Image (cartoon, grey):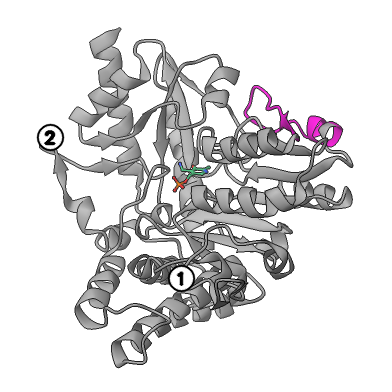
Amino acid sequence: MAVNMAQETRQETGEVPPLDPARIRADFPILAATVHGNPLVYLDNAATTQKPRAVLDAIARYYTEYNANVHRGVHYLSQVATEAYDEARRKAAAFLGATVDCEVIFTRGATESINLVAHSYGRQHVLPGDEILITGMEHHSNIVPWQILCKESGATLRVVPIDDDGNLIMEEFDRLLNERTRLVAVTHVSNALGTVNPIRDIAAKTHAVGAVVLVDGAQSAPHMPVNVRELGCDFFVCSGHKMYGPTGIGLLYGRAELLDAMPPYQSGGDMILSVTFEKTIYGRLPSKFEAGTPHIEGAIGLAAALDYLNAQGLDRVAAHERGLIRYAESALRAVPGLRLMGAPRQRAGVIAFTMDAAHPHDIGQVLDEAGVAIRAGHHCAQPVMKRFGVPASARASFGLYNTRDDVDTLVQGLHEVNRIFA
Ligand code: PMP
């Protein structure tokens, strides 16, 4: 992993200074913007994060200095582009703690990564009478592909319920997991509640019944150190745009042994060793799963984002955001008529709430006038809304550049909501 020298020295001396958000904010040009005449306060990081200059520059450099298609040309530019694309995979593999680079497949995002596993691994392994286990706090992207697979294969979808605090009910997980379970698909961190799930425990129990586990890391990878081997997962998915990288690029980690035995998801150029009209021999990993010209710019931009995150240190990012979330939780609890949605044992990235005085969309609108960007709606997690008996919620979600001042501005805006609507 590309750990920078300053970080290594700090780790050697055991001294880990906290993140300096003021310095970090200067790396993100958009954070200097004003919205409706007010300084932008960006608290919609679970939807997508802003991009540091290092990412923007890396993408511009690719197009201005070495734009070419990869894996095809003998010419100089193509070789430079290919090296950058392969280097991006090396960095992604190191970031996730994969054993070998080819365990990382570039996709369009978490959604496509899940679809790849459902179509390829799922169609091969899931048969009538089998079961797929998901949880009550999944994003639609980790529900619908499994629903479709179950419908096509004759398998049954089972759902582990969540309690009033937004924690997974592990006794129910234990009860629902059985020898018919083929695959467990679970989010590492809930985008609607912020709950951090006990993945290691889930993975160990899943393996004990002979099934595999897919972890949706869309909301964990930007916020905490992730190591797929320590987690014990078989598949792990995440999205570049939620990790300070570009849109349209994401990662699928899969254990090499599993990926090797899986059929292609899409087919065409680049994923073959040889083609005749009679027979096609597929390429090896990772190209077997990357048909067509890849998102070269996206991979290069994502690599720059991973470098940026590594340079800050994911443990420092996690500590900074933990402090901010604790501060925000108590500040929000003090707002009259505001109810936090869930109180998970461990929370990352997200705080969702409702207010007696106003619908989440009205909250969002008043905050927008004040320059504060939050999300209002069902957050692509309608079953969570149903579980909590609300049609929608307001959601503030944090990133490494957010500050206590941001939280204070949010809270001021919520007092304004009460003033307007109460
Ligand atoms: N899973 C979770 C938990 C998410 O929060 C999201 C995005 N909101 C996704 C999956 C889907 O990510 P993408 O839209 O980048 O594919």
CA separation in Å, label 2 and label 1: 48 Å
Residue located 71% across and 58% down the image: 234
Amino acid type, label 1 = Gly
Q: Is residue 291 above or below residue 317?
A: below
Residue 175 seen in the current view: yes
Which residue was labeled with disc 1?
269
Q: Which segment is the magenta one?
A: 155-175
- Tell me the quarter of the picture where residue 370 sits: top left
| Residue 401: % across, % down | 35, 53
| Residue 227: % across, % down | 64, 63
Residue in the foreground of this view, choosing between 413 and 12:
413
Residue 319 seen in the current view: no
Mark in the foreground, 2 or 1: 1
Residue in the foreground of this view, choosing between 144 and 187:
144
The dot on residue 36 is 2
Residue located 62% across and 33% down the image: 344
Residue located 74% across and 46% down the image: 183
Residue located 35% across and 10% down the image: 357
| Residue 154: % across, % down | 75, 34
Give the left or right position of residue 282, taking residue 218 as reference: right
Q: Is residue 165 magenta?
A: yes
- Quadrant where the C terminus sits is top left
Is ligand 1 less than 8 Å from the beta carbon at label 2? no
How many numbered tags mark residues here? 2
